[in-house]
Image (cartoon, grey):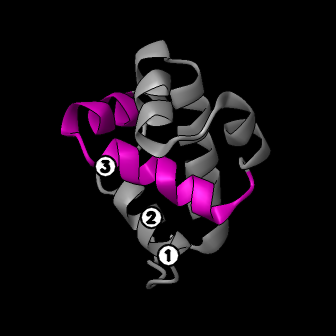
Amino acid sequence: MNNDAAETLAIQAIAFVAGDEELLQGLLMQTGMDLNDLRAGIGNRDVQRGVLEFLLSHEPFLMRLVDAIDCRPEMPAQAHMVLSGGPIWQD
């Protein structure tokens, strides 16, 4: 997974969370952000990583994302690692 793919997946995750009231409220409560912060931060790697961390912290949330965006279960963790400056995977 390269940087562009990681960012795309993170943006999909943000859109997914924003469209799910339960996840959205959980994210906002856990992070202290509000909806305007989330909107403004969609292109910010810190926000992208934070949303991925939130989803990765609870497997049922992660699996809901995986089903919604039709990706392999390991991809959100790979995206998080790439956005954190870690290794880039070759698909």
Q: What residue type is labelled 1?
A: Ser
User: What element does badge 3 sit on?
Assistant: helix
List the residue tagged with mark 2: 80
Measuring 64% from the left and 64% from the top, which residue is drawn there? 45
Alpha carbons under labels 1 and 2: distance apart: 6 Å
Front residue of 6 and 22: 22
Q: Are marks 2 and 3 in contact (CB under 8 Å)?
A: yes
Q: Which amino acid does label 3 sit on?
A: Leu
Q: Position of residue 69 (x, y in %)?
A: 49, 34
Q: Residues within 10 Å of mark 1 (few under 14, many from 20)?
A: few
Query: Quick check: 1 above or below 38?
Result: below
Residue tagged 1? 84
Q: Residue at x 34, y 28 (%)?
A: 64
Q: Which quarter of the picture shows residue 37?
A: top right
Q: Nearer the viewer, residue 70 or 87?
A: 87
Magenta span contains residue 5: no
- Can you tell which quarter of the image residue 91 is in? bottom left
Q: How far apart are marks 1 and 3 (CA)?
A: 14 Å
Disc 2 versus disc 3: distance between alpha carbons? 9 Å
